[in-house]
């Protein structure tokens, strides 16, 4: 990860917030954004993970501020944006990446479980956008990157609440792209396939990895489940956090200046197969 810093200046002059920056894709994206010159508000509710991300950025000369936040709390989200703005200026890039795993089918999931997954994976995306939009409008534009999932595009067993939340993110992305396009605010959604992260591990272990080759009655390890899932990916491997962060970087940069309202699978060909 440290090799990212010093790579270039594709985000020079930009102020970014990355939620879920304490681990997984958010960790990699926050470091990559800083590597390309952004000043980054790193947000996560996990203090230890947040501190690790901050250390990697700052030890390599990047600029960042830590925001320990529960992204389902509207007051804390507003404070996150205020803290980042106070440190660096108006936020011009938001990567709404924070999320949790969700398991259970529509018949068996409880209302409490459903509400929690929808709150973290969908409502928080709206809350973060709502908090950042006024500043983006004031400065004349910005980029909002929403973390959706292939689970919001195709049917996957055992993740009813997660699929509903991610499909909701896709709908919200398109609506906001139309609503705020006249303000030069671009809104796009990224839909990762399987990327080994703590969230994916929890989901796989709860759902058997969605691997059609798994034998009934067996208890495969996480690594075995990942191996069994490769049949879904024509490119022959699962993703890496760097794969997703690289595309988020493109959407955050001015290179994607005519890209808005898009929903892009980054999935090794899964949704094309």
Image (spheres, grey):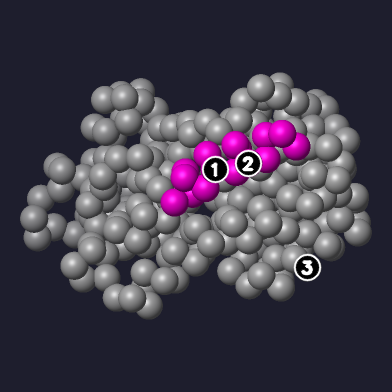
Q: Which mark is residue 175?
A: 1
Residue 65 visible to an observer of this rendering: no
Q: Which mark is residue 58?
A: none
User: For residue 238: magenta?
Assistant: no
Q: Could you tell me residue 141's position as x and y percent?
A: 78, 37
SS of the residue under disc 2: helix
Label 2 neighbour load within 10 Å: few <14, some 14-19, many 20+: few
Q: Nearer the viewer, residue 248 or 78?
A: 78
Residue 165 visible to an observer of this rendering: yes
Give the answer, above or below, for where 125 lies relative to 92. Answer: below
**Pointer 3 or 2: first along the chain:** 3
Q: Where is mark 3, residue-wise? A: 79
Label 3 neighbour load within 10 Å: few <14, some 14-19, many 20+: some
Query: Residue farthest to the left?
Result: 216
Q: Is residue 109 left or right of residue 5?
A: left
Q: Could you tell me residue 251's position as x and y percent?
A: 65, 31
Q: Which mark is residue 179?
A: 2
Question: On the image, which quarter does residue 102 sit in?
Answer: bottom left
Give the residue at x 74% y 53%: 132
- Range shown magenta: 168-183
SS of the residue under disc 3: helix
């Amino acid at each position: 990860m440290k090799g990212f810093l010093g790579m270039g200046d594709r985000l020079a002059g930009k102020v970014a917030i990355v939620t879920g920056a304490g681990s997984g894709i958010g960790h990699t994206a926050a470091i990559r954004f800083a590597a390309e010159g952004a000043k980054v508000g790193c947000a996560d509710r996990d203090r230890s993970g947040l501190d690790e991300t901050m250390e990697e950025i700052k030890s390599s000369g990047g600029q960042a501020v830590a925001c320990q936040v529960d992204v389902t709390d509207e007051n804390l989200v507003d404070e996150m944006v205020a803290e980042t703005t106070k440190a660096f200026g108006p936020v011009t890039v938001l990567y709404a990446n924070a999320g949790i795993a969700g398991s259970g089918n529509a018949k068996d999931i409880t209302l409490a479980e459903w509400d929690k997954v929808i709150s973290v994976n969908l409502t928080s995306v709206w809350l973060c956008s709502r908090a950042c939009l006024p500043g983006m409008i004031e400065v004349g534009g910005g980029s909002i990157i929403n973390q959706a999932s292939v689970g919001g595009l195709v049917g996957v067993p055992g993740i009813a609440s997660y699929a509903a939340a991610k499909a909701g993110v896709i709908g919200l992305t398109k609506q906001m792209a139309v609503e705020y396009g006249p303000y030069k605010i671009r809104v796009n959604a990224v839909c990762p396939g399987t990327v080994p992260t703590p969230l994916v591990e929890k989901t796989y272990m709860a759902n058997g990895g969605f691997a059609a080759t798994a034998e009934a009655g067996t208890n495969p390890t996480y690594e075995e489940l990942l191996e069994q899932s490769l049949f879904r990916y024509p490119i022959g491997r699962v993703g890496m956090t760097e794969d997703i962060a690289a595309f988020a970087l493109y959407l955050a940069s001015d290179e994607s200046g005519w890209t808005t309202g898009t929903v892009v699978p980054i999935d090794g060909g899964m949704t094309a197969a």
